[in-house]
Every structure is written in structure tokens, then in C-alpha cells.
Amino acid sequence: MKTTHYNQLQKDKSINVLDVLAHLLYHWKWFALSILLFGSYYYYQYAKSPFIYRSAETIIIKTPMNTPRTARISRTNEAYNSISVASEILQLKSKELMRQTVTRIGAEMSYTVGDGLRRKELYTASPIKVIVPKTKPEDSFSFTVTPVGGKEVVLSNWSEGDAALEVDATLDKPVNTPFGQVIVQSALKLNKALPQQEIKVEKFALEGMVNYFISTISITQMEEDASLLQIVAEDTNPLRATALIAEMINVYNEVALQDKNQIGVNTANFIRERLAIIEQELGSVESSIENLRTQNQGMDASTVGTAYFEDSRLYQSERNKVETDINLAQMMRGYLADGSKKNELIPNNTGLVDASVETQINDYNTTLLRRNRLIEGSSDANPVVQDLDRALQAMRGNIGRAVDNAIGGLKIKAGNMKKEENVARGKAMQVPQKQRVMLSVERQQKVKEELYLYLLNKREENAINQAMTEDNIRVIDPAIVSFDPVAPSKMRKLGLGMAIGFILPAIVIMTLSILDTGVRRRQDIEEAIDVPLLGEIPLATNKRTSQNNILVSAMGRDPLTEAFRILRTNMSFMAREGKHPQTITLTSFIPGVGKTFTSLNLSSTLSFLNKKVIVVDMDLRKGTLSERMGIIHGKGLSHYLSDVNLELEEIIHYNLHGKNVDYISIGMEAPNPVELLLSKRLDQLISDLRNRYDYIIIDGVPTGIVADATVVDRVSDLTLFVIRAGKMDKRQLPEIQKIYAEKRLSNLAIILNGLKLGQSGYGYGYGYGYGYGREEGQNSWIKIARSIRTIFNRKIKH
């Protein structure tokens, strides 16, 4: 039955949250110290951290869906038709774009002044401006400028070289410094005097500032299917954050316009080259006509051959058009076959080929521009660039094949026209040979004229379209300067510090509690075994002030006295067959747990009831009780057990610290304590003492170490097993359960000794002090926690 109950206890272990809370409140001083330290540290971090300001701007990416169509002459400006919002975001966050932006707004130079513990960025509000003529983008340095009155300043605190060196300088005049020549200018208007404050000037490496600003800028698409973007910049100066966003948009639009106009420039160069060639060919043809007419003495060949070549001219006209198309297509094919122009944009919208080929050329140019922008921020090894190169190669091949197909079709058509023309020309065989030559030359002249006029028209269209190019980005809501910092937050910093200050000690305390395997509270025993627990003895803080460790008093209201009173009361519940335990033995697993202290104070507590009590020191090996009472010398228990002629009266020490408490010392250390305790003299001694005294307290030896405790058990009515809080491992409790189950010790019960006053979960009889005077050592937090736990437990019971 007991084994079943013990097993049930092992299964019913649980954690009481209120006990954990009370345990943490017991260590409130550590929490207060930790919160104070971390709160102070994080407040210090707040006090020295520069303020961060946020600036936001809303822009729109122009697409055919959100941009009204203007009166364009051609499709040259349709380059933004296939714009991807994601790619635009990547371009806005490119390093090259940020380099130009940082350089334009001068963000690589920083001017700061002290503002308490933190530094304040001045930017354009700086009263001075420093110019270092020979500085390089990768240079970085810092120094301090201190105005000393008028136009004089002192330069000091150099980041390189002799930091203590001071250099006197005059405004607007160069001065030699460890960084080369430096010019300090006044940024104030109306020749105002410079304020008397130290200004720290820092020059940062350009790449470092580019990386910094890229990390502080966020670009988000406001809606999944919208072209609206929100650009947010955070910086230590609100003016610089606003200027950064505005200038970044300007630089981006400039670069986009340059890309778009590059197509127009390439087209203009192509048209100019072809016009020069056609002008030369047209001049040659006109010279040939002039020579033929001179040879014919001004004869009008058209009048002579009108009747015969009327049908032929119809086919000639159509053939001229086809040959013109063939010439134009061959020009484009020659341009595509030119290896030196492999990575250049293909002239578009020239009318040299049909509309489907022009669409492919437009897609090719758009992809090539995207590839060129990407390679500026990375390299040829970029996987995206390599994919685009392969796509461009395939597209250029498709364009070439399309042009070849167009040329083939035109040639077939021209051949058919030529056949029809030959049939009609056969009817005019009577026309003189010169007339035929004249007609051929005139036809060449007409072809060249048509091509020449066409290219002139296209040149004008291209020039107009270049002038009509639009920006890719339009600002919807411009960035507004806000002087309200978004970080650091005082409350957030203090809250974080206090949270860490609370959580860290809680984790440490709970970790130590989890790793602690010692028996420290009543619950540790009750949850592990079902051996009766008769009392909890608090740790005696004034133990050293007493000569013999007897700290209880008849009228005392302190926790220690109350604990022994409760122990005295609980002992009555251990009666067997209606008879209260008269012979009480104290034992333990190890020495030093407080058996002697408990024996002395328990005997005094029993004597307060006007009961006669005798304390017997049966630790024949050490005699700790006898030593503390100062009765180590003289006759004692060992003499009585070994000498049958010795009377009981000769070994009793009467009234050493009270009229109702007597003592029997060990006498002398016995070489054979077990044999003495096994003798019948011990039984006779206990029998005589039972007749004389109401209680017999036996201060025994630890069980398991020596056999004395088991030997003495035959004369005991009650065995009190003393456990010292923190000195016994919880893994030893099953051994006590085993002793209890096997009844190796008579009427076994446990006393938990050495509990710390006020520690949560370590209460004495579920809370001493209620109506018994003040609770020494307990603070108000522990009282509140225990009150809450009591109410909670009552509700559960109901």
C-alpha cells in the first residue's frame, strides 16, 4: 500500500507557478540590482546614441498604363513600355547611382558637435565648410575645428599623426596639415562670427558611405499591382536624408534619359553615313544621264519610246519599289553582319524592314540597355548578365534570319517582275540601244532619289523624338523634412534594459534551481516520498550568540521557537496504541545536519510543558552534545554500559540549562561502541529513565555509516530523521523511503532543518507568525506572495 502511494507521488509531481513567483521574489535584491545596472547601461546607450530621422517620398514608375500618350512621330520613345518595377527598384539601389548621389550632396563630409553624450550631425547647418583640394574618394580622416574669435580657428585632434598637434588657421586661407592643404570657410551669411564650439570634421571613404546609405534606404512597392514606390531614408540629419532621396531620383532620371537618347544617337549616325553614300551614288547617276543626253544631242528618249514602253513602265515601277526594299533590307543585313557593331544598338524605326522585324529590333535594344545597366553595378560573371548575353545573341540571330527571309521574298518578287518586264520589253526591240541605256540610268536615278528623300525624312523624325524623351520616374509626394527623431526611443531603451535586467536574473535563478539537486524545501520531500514530515526548523541566525545552541524560550514568539512548538505538537500524532512516543532518537545520513542542535532545543521545548526531559548522548564516537554542554569529562554512558556496578545517579547531570532538563554525557570515547550498545545495560538504562522522565531524547549517530543507529533503534518509540536543507541530494530520498518501507527504524519521521527565513516554498508549518508576533527576516513581497498562494490553494480545495 505504501509502495503504491509512493509511486503515485512520483507521478503527481507538478510545478506551482505561485511558488516559483514567490521564490523569485525572495531574491528581489538581485532583480533590483540587475534592473538598476541594465537600466542604467541602456539609458547610457540611449544618451550617447545619435538621433535618427526618417524621410519618405512617394514616386511613380511611368508605364503606358499610367502615362498619357503624347503625339510621337515614331515608336522611338516607347523604350519604357516593358519596364519592370522590380528591376527599377534594383537600379535605384545600385551602387553606381548611390556614388553619384553621395558625391553631389557632399555626404562624405560630416560636421558634428557635442550634444550631451551624443554627437549631432550638422550637415548644411554647419557654420564652417572644410575643403581638402587633393583628397581622394577612398581617403578617410577626421580632426576638430575650434573657432577662437574673428576669422581664426584652431585645428586639432588629428585621426592620423600627432593627435596633440594644434594648427592655427585663418578662414578662406589654405593651411598645411597632416592631411595636406586644408581650407576652412565660413558657411554663415552676413559675415557673422563663428560660434565658440568644437566642430568635428570627418571625411569618410566614398565606398563606405555608399554602403552605409544603401543599408539605410528602403524601397517598397505600395501595392502589388501598382507602379507606386515609397522610398524611405534614415539618417542622423533630417536635411541630409531628404536631400539624399531627392538627388537620387534626379540622378536616376538623368541616367535613364541618357540610355533612351543613346538609341536616337546611333540611329542618327547610321542615317548620316547612308546619306553620304547615296549622295555620291546619285551624283554619279545624274552625271551619266547628262552624258547620254549630250551624246543624243538633247533627244527626249521618253517621247520616242512612249508608245512602246507604256506596258513596260508599269512593271518597272513595281520592280523599282521592290528593288528599293531589297536595297534597304541589304543595308540592314550588312549592319547586322558587321562584327565591330556587335554590342551596339541596332538602328530602329528606319523603315528598312517590315514592322515585325522592327518589333524584334525594339525588343533587342531594350534588352541590351538593361544588360548594360546591370553590368555597371556588377561584372560579366553575373549570372543575370550571362543570361541576357545569351538572349541577345539569340535575338540578333532571329533578326538576321528575319531580314534574310525578307530579302529572299523580295528577290523572288523582283524576279517575277523582271520576267514580266522582259516580256513587255520584247515589244520595244525597235527602240535604239541608247534609249534603253537612258531608261536604265533614269531608273537608277529614281531609286536613289526615293531612298535619299526617305532618309532625310527619317533624320528629322529621329531628331524630334530625341527632343521629346520623357523621365522614367515622377514624384508624387516629395520628401518633407521632419525634425522628430524616430530612434533611439528612450522608453524602448529603458524598457529593454529593465526587461533584460529582470529576465537575466530570473533565468540564472531558475537555472540554478533546476540544476540544484539538494533538498531545500518541504515540497521536495513530500513530492518524492511519503515518510511523515513532522517539522521544519528555520536556520538560526543568532546561533553563535548562544553558548550551548539552545535558542528557544518559554515565552518566545520568534520563528525558531514556533517551529519547535509545532514539532512538539506534531510528535503527539506519532503515538502508537494511544501512547505518545517517550523515547525519541535523532539520526541522519551524514553528520553536521543539526541533530545535536535539534536535540537541545527540542528538549527545552518539551520542558516548557512542565515535563521532565533527559537528553542522552549516544554518539559514543564523537560526543558532540557532551562537548557543547561542557560535560565531556567525568562519568557517562560508556562508563555505565561497561560497569555493572555503576549507578544511574552517578552519570546524570541535573538542570544544566533548566530545571526540567537533565543530561547524560558519553563519558569517555569507547573503543567498542557497538558492543556496549548491544548490552542489556542499555535496555535497563532506558527502562529506568522511562520511570523517571516523561521524555528521553537520544542524540544518535548517522545511519548507514555505522551500525550504532540500528542497534539503538530497539529502545526507540520515535525516530526523527534530520535532513539539513541544501546538504542532502534529492536522489538520496528513495533510500529513506526504503528504510521507512522496510521498517528498519521504529516509527520513522523526518525533520527538515536549516531553512532560510522568508524563502518562498520553504515555509515553516505553512507560515509562522500569523498571530504570533512579527516574522523576522521576511519582507512584504514574500508576505504578499504567500497570501496569494494561500487564497489560491483554498479556491482549489473548494
Image (tube, rainbow, N blue to C red):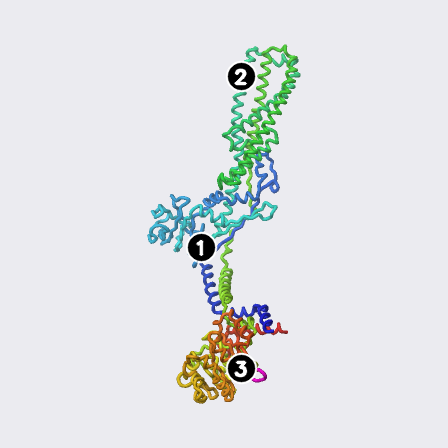
Q: Nearer the viewer, residue 201 or 84?
A: 84
- Which kind of residue does numbered mark 3 sit on? Asp
Q: Residue at x 66, y 16 (%)?
A: 311
Q: Is residue 582 magenta?
A: yes
Dot 2 falls on a residue whose secondary structure is helix
Instruction: Locate residue 371 relative to residue 65 in the image: left or right.
Output: left
Mark 2 and mark 3 lie on one chain; the one further toward the N terminus is 2
Measure the alpha-carbon separation of dots 2 and 3: 148 Å
Local crowd size for mark 3, using a 10 Å CA cut-off: few (<14), some (14–19), many (≥20):
many
Q: How many marks?
A: 3
Q: Nearer the viewer, residue 308 or 723?
A: 723
Q: Nearer the viewer, residue 588 or 154?
A: 588
Dot 1 falls on a residue whose secondary structure is strand
For the stretch drawn in magenta, what is the main secondary structure?
loop
Image quadrant where one finds the N terminus: bottom right
Quadrant position of residue 436: top right
Query: Label 2 belongs to which residue?
Result: 287
Give the x, y percent position of residue 615.
47, 84
Q: Nearer the viewer, residue 327 or 654?
A: 654
Measure the alpha-carbon separation of dots 3 and 1: 83 Å
- Which kind of residue does numbered mark 2 sit on? Ser
In the image, residue 345 sits, relative to residue 708, either above or below, namely above
Measure the alpha-carbon separation of dots 2 and 1: 81 Å
Give the x, y percent position of residue 678.
48, 81
Query: Label 1 belongs to which residue?
Result: 120
- Which kind of residue does numbered mark 1 sit on? Lys
Residue 780 visible in the snapshot: yes
Query: Label 3 belongs to which residue?
Result: 717
Tags 2 and 1 in contact by the CB under 8 Å rule?
no
Q: Residue at x 47, y 47 (%)?
A: 211
